[in-house]
Amino acid sequence: MFARAQRSIPAGVNSPVRAFRSVGGTPRFLVRGEGPYVFDADGKRYIDYVGSWGPAIAGHAHPDVVKAVQVTAVHGLSFGAPTEIEIELAETLIARLPSLELVRLVSSGTEATMSALRLARGYTGRAKIIKFEGCYHGHGDSLLVKAGSGALTFGQPSSAGVPPAVANETIVVPYNDVAAVEESFIANPDAIAAVIVEPVAGNMNLVLPATGFLEGLRTLCDRYGAVLIFDEVMTGFRVGPHGAQGRFGIKPDLTTLGKVIGGGMPVGAFGGRRDIMEEIAPLGPVYQAGTLSGNPVAVAAGLATLALTDAPGFHDALARRTRTLTEGLVAVAKRRGVAFSAQAIGGMFGLYFAELVPRSYADVMTCDTARFNRFFHAMLDAGIYFAPSAYEAGFVSAAHGEAQIRETLAAAERAFAAAS
Protein backbone atom coordinates (compact mmCIF):
# COMPACT_ATOMS: atom_id res chain seq x y z
CA MET A 1 0.00 0.00 0.00
CA PHE A 2 2.81 2.43 0.85
CA ALA A 3 4.56 1.80 -2.47
CA ARG A 4 1.26 2.28 -4.29
CA ALA A 5 0.46 5.48 -2.37
CA GLN A 6 3.80 7.06 -3.28
CA ARG A 7 2.93 6.79 -6.97
CA SER A 8 -0.06 9.13 -6.58
CA ILE A 9 0.39 11.05 -3.30
CA PRO A 10 3.50 13.08 -2.29
CA ALA A 11 5.56 10.78 -0.04
CA GLY A 12 2.51 8.53 0.05
CA VAL A 13 0.75 10.52 2.76
CA ASN A 14 -1.67 13.41 3.08
CA SER A 15 -0.03 14.89 6.19
CA PRO A 16 3.76 14.79 6.62
CA VAL A 17 4.24 13.18 10.04
CA ARG A 18 2.33 10.10 8.88
CA ALA A 19 5.21 9.18 6.57
CA PHE A 20 7.36 7.78 9.46
CA ARG A 21 10.37 9.60 8.01
CA SER A 22 11.66 10.78 11.39
CA VAL A 23 11.39 7.31 12.95
CA GLY A 24 12.05 5.24 9.84
CA GLY A 25 10.16 2.25 8.57
CA THR A 26 6.82 1.85 6.86
CA PRO A 27 3.72 3.69 8.10
CA ARG A 28 0.81 1.54 9.17
CA PHE A 29 -2.25 1.79 6.94
CA LEU A 30 -5.23 1.60 9.28
CA VAL A 31 -8.54 0.05 8.33
CA ARG A 32 -10.65 0.44 11.46
CA GLY A 33 -10.74 1.54 15.08
CA GLU A 34 -12.64 0.18 18.05
CA GLY A 35 -12.47 1.76 21.49
CA PRO A 36 -8.78 2.00 22.49
CA TYR A 37 -7.62 -0.04 19.49
CA VAL A 38 -6.79 0.46 15.83
CA PHE A 39 -6.25 -2.30 13.27
CA ASP A 40 -3.94 -2.14 10.27
CA ALA A 41 -4.29 -3.55 6.77
CA ASP A 42 -2.37 -6.67 7.80
CA GLY A 43 -4.92 -7.35 10.54
CA LYS A 44 -2.64 -6.43 13.44
CA ARG A 45 -4.22 -4.78 16.49
CA TYR A 46 -2.60 -1.84 18.29
CA ILE A 47 -3.40 -0.02 21.52
CA ASP A 48 -3.73 3.49 20.13
CA TYR A 49 -2.25 6.52 21.89
CA VAL A 50 -2.59 8.82 18.86
CA GLY A 51 -6.38 8.92 18.79
CA SER A 52 -6.51 10.65 15.39
CA TRP A 53 -4.16 13.21 16.98
CA GLY A 54 -6.61 14.08 19.76
CA PRO A 55 -10.25 13.91 18.67
CA ALA A 56 -10.96 10.34 19.78
CA ILE A 57 -11.41 11.28 23.44
CA ALA A 58 -14.23 8.73 23.82
CA GLY A 59 -12.35 6.05 21.90
CA HIS A 60 -12.77 5.00 18.30
CA ALA A 61 -16.20 4.38 16.79
CA HIS A 62 -18.12 5.10 19.98
CA PRO A 63 -21.69 3.89 19.35
CA ASP A 64 -23.25 7.23 20.32
CA VAL A 65 -21.02 9.16 17.92
CA VAL A 66 -21.49 6.68 15.08
CA LYS A 67 -25.26 6.77 15.55
CA ALA A 68 -25.32 10.58 15.50
CA VAL A 69 -23.43 10.56 12.20
CA GLN A 70 -25.68 7.93 10.67
CA VAL A 71 -28.91 9.61 11.71
CA THR A 72 -27.76 12.99 10.43
CA ALA A 73 -26.28 11.71 7.16
CA VAL A 74 -29.61 10.21 6.11
CA HIS A 75 -30.97 13.75 5.75
CA GLY A 76 -28.10 15.05 3.62
CA LEU A 77 -24.36 15.54 3.91
CA SER A 78 -24.06 19.27 3.32
CA PHE A 79 -26.24 22.22 2.37
CA GLY A 80 -24.09 25.36 2.40
CA ALA A 81 -26.96 26.96 4.31
CA PRO A 82 -27.81 27.51 7.99
CA THR A 83 -28.96 24.53 10.06
CA GLU A 84 -30.26 24.27 13.61
CA ILE A 85 -27.59 21.80 14.63
CA GLU A 86 -24.79 24.33 14.07
CA ILE A 87 -26.56 26.68 16.50
CA GLU A 88 -26.55 23.86 19.05
CA LEU A 89 -22.80 23.39 18.72
CA ALA A 90 -22.16 27.14 18.98
CA GLU A 91 -24.33 27.36 22.10
CA THR A 92 -22.57 24.34 23.59
CA LEU A 93 -19.12 25.87 23.05
CA ILE A 94 -20.18 29.21 24.51
CA ALA A 95 -21.63 27.49 27.58
CA ARG A 96 -18.38 25.60 28.16
CA LEU A 97 -15.91 28.41 27.51
CA PRO A 98 -16.91 31.68 29.22
CA SER A 99 -14.49 33.67 27.05
CA LEU A 100 -16.67 32.94 24.01
CA GLU A 101 -19.43 35.44 23.35
CA LEU A 102 -19.73 34.72 19.63
CA VAL A 103 -18.28 31.77 17.73
CA ARG A 104 -17.94 30.86 14.06
CA LEU A 105 -17.56 27.28 12.83
CA VAL A 106 -14.99 26.34 10.19
CA SER A 107 -13.67 23.04 8.82
CA SER A 108 -10.23 22.66 10.43
CA GLY A 109 -7.96 23.91 13.18
CA THR A 110 -5.68 25.54 10.61
CA GLU A 111 -8.62 27.47 9.19
CA ALA A 112 -9.60 28.55 12.70
CA THR A 113 -6.16 29.97 13.54
CA MET A 114 -5.72 31.65 10.16
CA SER A 115 -9.11 33.32 10.55
CA ALA A 116 -8.45 34.37 14.14
CA LEU A 117 -5.20 36.05 13.15
CA ARG A 118 -6.81 37.88 10.23
CA LEU A 119 -9.55 39.02 12.59
CA ALA A 120 -7.05 40.24 15.19
CA ARG A 121 -5.20 42.21 12.51
CA GLY A 122 -8.42 43.67 11.18
CA TYR A 123 -9.65 44.57 14.64
CA THR A 124 -6.42 46.27 15.75
CA GLY A 125 -5.29 47.71 12.40
CA ARG A 126 -1.84 46.24 13.11
CA ALA A 127 0.22 43.72 11.15
CA LYS A 128 2.67 41.93 13.45
CA ILE A 129 2.00 38.87 15.58
CA ILE A 130 3.94 37.10 18.31
CA LYS A 131 4.14 33.33 18.36
CA PHE A 132 6.28 30.94 20.37
CA GLU A 133 9.22 28.83 19.31
CA GLY A 134 8.13 25.26 18.67
CA CYS A 135 4.39 25.97 18.82
CA TYR A 136 2.31 24.89 15.84
CA HIS A 137 -0.91 26.62 14.82
CA GLY A 138 -1.57 25.07 11.44
CA HIS A 139 0.09 25.69 8.12
CA GLY A 140 -0.86 29.32 7.47
CA ASP A 141 1.97 31.42 6.05
CA SER A 142 2.27 33.68 9.09
CA LEU A 143 2.63 30.68 11.38
CA LEU A 144 5.27 28.55 9.66
CA VAL A 145 8.11 30.28 11.41
CA LYS A 146 9.80 28.08 14.00
CA ALA A 147 6.76 25.83 13.84
CA GLY A 148 6.43 22.60 15.80
CA SER A 149 4.89 19.25 14.90
CA GLY A 150 5.63 17.97 11.39
CA ALA A 151 7.88 20.92 10.63
CA LEU A 152 10.13 19.98 13.54
CA THR A 153 10.01 16.33 12.58
CA PHE A 154 11.78 17.11 9.32
CA GLY A 155 14.19 19.64 10.79
CA GLN A 156 12.69 22.48 8.75
CA PRO A 157 11.12 24.90 11.22
CA SER A 158 10.35 27.41 8.46
CA SER A 159 8.60 26.42 5.25
CA ALA A 160 9.63 27.18 1.71
CA GLY A 161 6.98 29.13 -0.13
CA VAL A 162 6.40 31.62 2.67
CA PRO A 163 7.29 35.12 1.37
CA PRO A 164 9.88 36.92 3.53
CA ALA A 165 7.55 39.89 3.78
CA VAL A 166 4.96 37.66 5.45
CA ALA A 167 7.47 35.94 7.74
CA ASN A 168 8.85 39.32 8.80
CA GLU A 169 5.49 40.17 10.37
CA THR A 170 5.87 37.22 12.77
CA ILE A 171 7.95 37.67 15.91
CA VAL A 172 9.10 34.37 17.44
CA VAL A 173 10.02 34.19 21.12
CA PRO A 174 10.82 31.26 23.45
CA TYR A 175 7.87 29.51 25.08
CA ASN A 176 7.52 30.29 28.80
CA ASP A 177 9.58 33.50 28.43
CA VAL A 178 7.38 36.47 29.42
CA ALA A 179 10.36 38.84 29.45
CA ALA A 180 11.01 38.14 25.74
CA VAL A 181 7.39 38.94 24.96
CA GLU A 182 7.63 42.24 26.81
CA GLU A 183 10.84 43.11 24.97
CA SER A 184 9.06 42.46 21.68
CA PHE A 185 6.24 44.82 22.60
CA ILE A 186 8.70 47.51 23.64
CA ALA A 187 10.63 47.13 20.38
CA ASN A 188 7.45 47.25 18.27
CA PRO A 189 5.17 49.85 19.85
CA ASP A 190 1.67 49.99 18.37
CA ALA A 191 2.59 47.32 15.79
CA ILE A 192 1.62 43.99 17.36
CA ALA A 193 -1.89 42.81 16.63
CA ALA A 194 -1.91 39.55 18.57
CA VAL A 195 -0.10 37.02 20.68
CA ILE A 196 -1.04 33.46 19.74
CA VAL A 197 -0.10 30.62 22.07
CA GLU A 198 -0.83 26.98 22.78
CA PRO A 199 -1.68 27.35 26.49
CA VAL A 200 -0.28 23.85 26.83
CA ALA A 201 2.17 23.21 24.02
CA GLY A 202 1.53 19.89 22.30
CA ASN A 203 3.37 20.14 19.02
CA MET A 204 6.96 20.16 20.25
CA ASN A 205 5.92 17.29 22.48
CA LEU A 206 4.02 18.26 25.63
CA VAL A 207 5.34 21.37 27.39
CA LEU A 208 3.37 22.88 30.27
CA PRO A 209 3.12 26.63 30.87
CA ALA A 210 5.39 27.86 33.65
CA THR A 211 3.82 29.55 36.65
CA GLY A 212 2.89 33.10 35.68
CA PHE A 213 3.46 32.63 31.93
CA LEU A 214 -0.13 32.78 30.74
CA GLU A 215 -0.97 35.46 33.31
CA GLY A 216 1.95 37.51 32.00
CA LEU A 217 0.67 37.26 28.44
CA ARG A 218 -2.76 38.48 29.53
CA THR A 219 -1.22 41.45 31.32
CA LEU A 220 1.01 42.44 28.40
CA CYS A 221 -1.77 42.18 25.83
CA ASP A 222 -3.96 44.40 27.99
CA ARG A 223 -1.15 46.90 28.44
CA TYR A 224 -0.27 47.17 24.74
CA GLY A 225 -3.72 46.73 23.21
CA ALA A 226 -3.01 43.40 21.52
CA VAL A 227 -5.39 40.47 21.12
CA LEU A 228 -4.55 37.36 23.16
CA ILE A 229 -5.38 34.19 21.19
CA PHE A 230 -5.43 30.79 22.88
CA ASP A 231 -4.98 28.00 20.36
CA GLU A 232 -7.02 25.29 22.07
CA VAL A 233 -7.34 23.10 19.00
CA MET A 234 -5.52 20.40 20.95
CA THR A 235 -6.26 21.32 24.58
CA GLY A 236 -9.93 22.19 24.09
CA PHE A 237 -11.85 19.71 26.30
CA ARG A 238 -8.77 17.47 26.45
CA VAL A 239 -7.22 19.01 29.57
CA GLY A 240 -10.50 19.74 31.33
CA PRO A 241 -14.20 20.47 30.79
CA HIS A 242 -13.51 24.17 30.21
CA GLY A 243 -10.30 23.85 28.25
CA ALA A 244 -6.91 25.16 29.30
CA GLN A 245 -8.40 28.61 29.90
CA GLY A 246 -10.72 27.16 32.50
CA ARG A 247 -8.00 25.07 34.06
CA PHE A 248 -5.58 27.99 34.41
CA GLY A 249 -8.17 30.72 34.98
CA ILE A 250 -7.07 32.95 32.09
CA LYS A 251 -9.59 34.58 29.75
CA PRO A 252 -8.24 35.06 26.21
CA ASP A 253 -9.75 37.51 23.72
CA LEU A 254 -10.06 34.85 21.00
CA THR A 255 -9.96 31.05 21.13
CA THR A 256 -9.43 28.53 18.34
CA LEU A 257 -10.85 25.02 18.60
CA GLY A 258 -10.86 21.76 16.66
CA LYS A 259 -10.30 18.03 17.17
CA VAL A 260 -12.59 17.06 20.09
CA ILE A 261 -15.38 19.39 18.93
CA GLY A 262 -15.65 17.26 15.78
CA GLY A 263 -15.21 13.88 17.44
CA GLY A 264 -13.09 12.67 14.51
CA MET A 265 -14.86 14.60 11.76
CA PRO A 266 -13.29 17.76 10.22
CA VAL A 267 -14.52 20.69 12.32
CA GLY A 268 -12.89 23.83 13.72
CA ALA A 269 -14.11 27.00 15.37
CA PHE A 270 -12.90 30.40 16.49
CA GLY A 271 -14.64 32.76 18.84
CA GLY A 272 -14.29 35.25 21.63
CA ARG A 273 -15.22 38.78 22.60
CA ARG A 274 -18.33 40.13 20.92
CA ASP A 275 -16.75 43.43 19.89
CA ILE A 276 -13.96 41.57 18.09
CA MET A 277 -16.14 38.90 16.52
CA GLU A 278 -18.51 41.50 15.14
CA GLU A 279 -15.70 42.60 12.81
CA ILE A 280 -16.23 39.38 10.84
CA ALA A 281 -18.22 39.57 7.59
CA PRO A 282 -21.08 40.15 7.03
CA LEU A 283 -21.15 42.31 10.19
CA GLY A 284 -17.72 43.83 9.62
CA PRO A 285 -14.92 44.24 7.08
CA VAL A 286 -12.86 41.11 7.92
CA TYR A 287 -13.78 38.48 5.35
CA GLN A 288 -14.04 34.79 6.17
CA ALA A 289 -16.17 32.12 4.52
CA GLY A 290 -16.42 28.38 3.99
CA THR A 291 -18.85 26.26 1.98
CA LEU A 292 -18.66 23.33 4.40
CA SER A 293 -18.50 25.38 7.61
CA GLY A 294 -21.01 24.01 10.10
CA ASN A 295 -21.36 20.78 8.11
CA PRO A 296 -24.26 18.97 9.83
CA VAL A 297 -22.68 15.50 9.86
CA ALA A 298 -19.44 16.75 11.41
CA VAL A 299 -21.32 18.94 13.88
CA ALA A 300 -23.45 15.96 14.94
CA ALA A 301 -20.29 13.94 15.67
CA GLY A 302 -18.92 16.81 17.73
CA LEU A 303 -22.08 17.29 19.76
CA ALA A 304 -22.28 13.58 20.52
CA THR A 305 -18.64 13.52 21.61
CA LEU A 306 -19.01 16.58 23.85
CA ALA A 307 -22.12 15.05 25.41
CA LEU A 308 -20.08 11.98 26.38
CA THR A 309 -17.57 14.19 28.19
CA ASP A 310 -20.42 15.51 30.36
CA ALA A 311 -20.62 12.20 32.21
CA PRO A 312 -19.89 12.68 35.95
CA GLY A 313 -16.17 12.39 36.64
CA PHE A 314 -15.26 11.97 32.97
CA HIS A 315 -12.24 14.27 32.97
CA ASP A 316 -11.05 13.20 36.43
CA ALA A 317 -11.04 9.56 35.36
CA LEU A 318 -9.28 10.43 32.10
CA ALA A 319 -6.57 12.34 33.96
CA ARG A 320 -6.03 9.50 36.46
CA ARG A 321 -5.67 6.97 33.67
CA THR A 322 -3.18 9.16 31.83
CA ARG A 323 -1.09 9.68 34.97
CA THR A 324 -1.08 5.94 35.59
CA LEU A 325 0.39 5.45 32.13
CA THR A 326 3.10 8.09 32.43
CA GLU A 327 4.07 7.21 36.00
CA GLY A 328 4.25 3.55 35.03
CA LEU A 329 6.51 4.29 32.07
CA VAL A 330 8.84 6.38 34.23
CA ALA A 331 9.06 3.55 36.77
CA VAL A 332 9.86 0.99 34.07
CA ALA A 333 12.54 3.22 32.56
CA LYS A 334 14.11 3.78 35.97
CA ARG A 335 14.35 0.04 36.56
CA ARG A 336 16.01 -0.31 33.18
CA GLY A 337 18.44 2.54 33.85
CA VAL A 338 17.18 4.61 30.91
CA ALA A 339 17.27 8.42 30.99
CA PHE A 340 13.57 9.11 30.56
CA SER A 341 10.86 11.41 31.88
CA ALA A 342 7.15 11.91 31.25
CA GLN A 343 4.27 14.13 32.30
CA ALA A 344 0.53 14.40 31.78
CA ILE A 345 -2.28 16.94 31.94
CA GLY A 346 -5.85 15.82 31.48
CA GLY A 347 -5.86 13.25 28.68
CA MET A 348 -2.59 14.49 27.11
CA PHE A 349 0.89 13.21 27.85
CA GLY A 350 4.50 13.70 26.83
CA LEU A 351 7.36 11.18 26.71
CA TYR A 352 10.97 12.40 26.69
CA PHE A 353 14.25 10.57 26.49
CA ALA A 354 15.86 13.02 28.89
CA GLU A 355 16.39 13.13 32.65
CA LEU A 356 14.20 16.20 33.13
CA VAL A 357 10.84 17.22 31.70
CA PRO A 358 11.40 20.03 29.15
CA ARG A 359 10.11 23.57 29.69
CA SER A 360 10.94 25.02 26.27
CA TYR A 361 11.70 24.23 22.64
CA ALA A 362 15.41 24.35 23.43
CA ASP A 363 14.94 21.72 26.15
CA VAL A 364 12.93 19.50 23.80
CA MET A 365 15.71 19.63 21.23
CA THR A 366 18.15 18.09 23.71
CA CYS A 367 16.10 14.89 24.03
CA ASP A 368 17.59 11.70 22.56
CA THR A 369 15.57 11.20 19.37
CA ALA A 370 17.58 8.16 18.27
CA ARG A 371 16.64 6.38 21.47
CA PHE A 372 13.02 7.45 21.03
CA ASN A 373 13.01 5.95 17.54
CA ARG A 374 14.23 2.59 18.83
CA PHE A 375 11.63 2.67 21.60
CA PHE A 376 8.89 3.63 19.15
CA HIS A 377 9.56 0.68 16.87
CA ALA A 378 9.88 -1.80 19.73
CA MET A 379 6.51 -0.65 21.05
CA LEU A 380 4.98 -0.73 17.57
CA ASP A 381 6.17 -4.32 17.11
CA ALA A 382 4.52 -5.13 20.44
CA GLY A 383 1.21 -3.65 19.30
CA ILE A 384 1.46 -0.23 20.98
CA TYR A 385 0.89 2.74 18.68
CA PHE A 386 2.53 5.97 19.86
CA ALA A 387 2.94 9.05 17.67
CA PRO A 388 5.67 8.46 15.05
CA SER A 389 7.66 11.50 16.14
CA ALA A 390 9.56 12.60 19.23
CA TYR A 391 7.87 15.99 18.90
CA GLU A 392 4.24 15.03 19.42
CA ALA A 393 2.07 14.75 22.50
CA GLY A 394 0.13 11.54 23.08
CA PHE A 395 -3.50 10.97 23.99
CA VAL A 396 -5.41 8.62 26.25
CA SER A 397 -9.13 8.07 25.69
CA ALA A 398 -11.99 7.15 28.00
CA ALA A 399 -11.90 3.71 26.34
CA HIS A 400 -8.41 2.97 27.67
CA GLY A 401 -8.67 0.91 30.84
CA GLU A 402 -6.40 -0.87 33.29
CA ALA A 403 -5.93 -3.81 30.93
CA GLN A 404 -4.61 -1.64 28.10
CA ILE A 405 -2.23 0.23 30.41
CA ARG A 406 -0.92 -3.02 31.90
CA GLU A 407 -0.27 -4.34 28.40
CA THR A 408 1.50 -1.09 27.47
CA LEU A 409 3.76 -1.21 30.53
CA ALA A 410 4.59 -4.86 29.92
CA ALA A 411 5.63 -4.00 26.36
CA ALA A 412 7.66 -1.06 27.68
CA GLU A 413 9.78 -3.41 29.82
CA ARG A 414 11.13 -4.93 26.62
CA ALA A 415 11.11 -1.71 24.59
CA PHE A 416 13.25 0.25 27.05
CA ALA A 417 15.81 -2.52 26.87
CA ALA A 418 15.83 -2.16 23.08
CA ALA A 419 16.13 1.61 23.36
CA SER A 420 19.14 1.54 25.69
Image (cartoon, grey):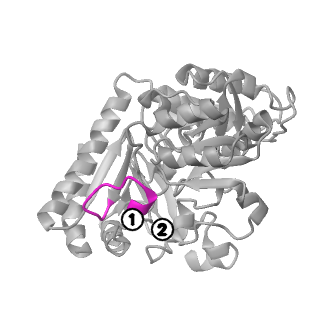
Q: Is residue 33 left or right of residue 286?
A: left
Q: Is residue 224 left or right of residue 180?
A: right
Residue located 85% across and 32% down the image = 281
Q: Are marks 1 and 2 in contact (CB under 8 Å)?
A: yes
* Mark positioned earlier in the residue sequence (1 or 2): 2
In percent of width and height, residue 204 lies at: 47, 57
Q: Which residue is mark 2?
A: 28
Residue type of the residue flagged with mark 2? Arg
**Kind of residue at badge 1:** Lys
Residue 399 pos. (x, y %): 36, 41
Q: Nearer the viewer, residue 86 or 93?
A: 93
Residue 77 appears in view: no
Tell me the SS state at disc 1. Answer: loop
Q: Residue at x 67, y 32 (%)?
A: 225
Range of the magenta residues? 352-363
- Name the residue rendered at 14%, 67% in the picture: 336
